[in-house]
Amino acid sequence: MKTPDARTFYETEALREGWSVWQLDRQIGSQLFERLALSRNKAALLRKAADAQQGGVLTPEEAIRDPFVLEFLGLKDEYSESDLEAALIQRLTDFLLELGDDFAFVGRQRRLRIDDTWFRVDLVFFHRRLRCLVIIDLKVGKFSYADAGQMHLYLNYAREHWVKPDENPPVGLILCAEKGAAEARYALDNLPNKILAAEYQTVLPDETLIVAELERTRAELEQRRSASGPGAASTED
């Protein structure tokens, strides 16, 4: 590893999750440390190298990565949602590694009936730390606000019929090839159900670009810490 933070992160996660040599090699090759550091909650995930989140309260935003790297699927340029689902099931062990060790597979193509209409949920997982079902809807195209409405329907049904008494409300994950940040925010914010949208990539990220972005993020965090240090003016004044 080129930095002590990255080395500490991979050491800690390999011990905690029981990675094999192959799994550790894959996580390093897919730049897991850098990808996590560039996720939604950048400050919290950068601190993960020091294992700061152990024992703390985990949020769905912190538990679910964005983007996912699915290079192990070997998909070509053109494929359908059913092709994507079948490939994920065929390589379920690899997909669980990318999801994280807290995810447990529950089922695929889970059927539900509302009035006289049948629906099928692509994938259902359970997250041990969040203690809730995670319902995944696969989209080969760009995220649309209509996807949020469909997921909202699934979660309302799951909350009533699938959730056990000691579990938390289900979380929805719309896994798409592309999303517009503004459309996703306006479609998903302040909903009664927790719904997240995350992108997936079928090739490994460009190492040069992701390292450059990580350094920019580090600089931003250092600047925020300096601005909020002793004697700094409060932004709330």
Image (cartoon, helix red, strand yellow):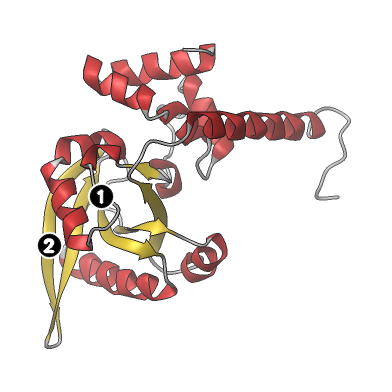
Q: Can the viewer see residue 100 in this picture?
A: no
Q: Residue furthest bottom?
A: 116
Three-letter amino acid code at disc 1?
Lys
Residue 80: image quadrant is: bottom left
Three-letter amino acid code at disc 2?
Gln
Residue for point 80% across, 50% down: 236
Image position of 212 (left or right of 200): right
Which tag, 2 or 1, sits closer to the chain's start?
1
Q: Position of residue 186 (x, y in %)?
A: 54, 69
Residue 168: image quadrant is: bottom left
Look at mark 2 in the image and give the residue it sits on: 109
Asked if residue 31 is positioned above or below residue 150 in the image, the reply reads above
Q: Position of residue 126 (x, y in %)?
A: 22, 47
Residue for point 27% across, 46% down: 131
Q: Can the viewer see residue 119 in this picture?
A: yes
Instruction: Please count the marks in the image.
Output: 2
Query: Viewer-nearest of labels 2 and 1?
Result: 1
Q: Helix, strand or loop at disc 2?
A: strand
Q: Helix, strand or loop at disc 1?
A: loop
Residue for point 71% across, 28% down: 222
Look at mark 1 in the image and give the residue it sits on: 76
Distance of label 2 from label 1 (alpha carbons): 23 Å
Q: Position of residue 127 (x, y in %)?
A: 26, 44
Tell me the number on the disc at residue 123.
Answer: none
Image position of 28 (left or right of 223): left
For this rendering, which residue is in front, 85 or 165? 85
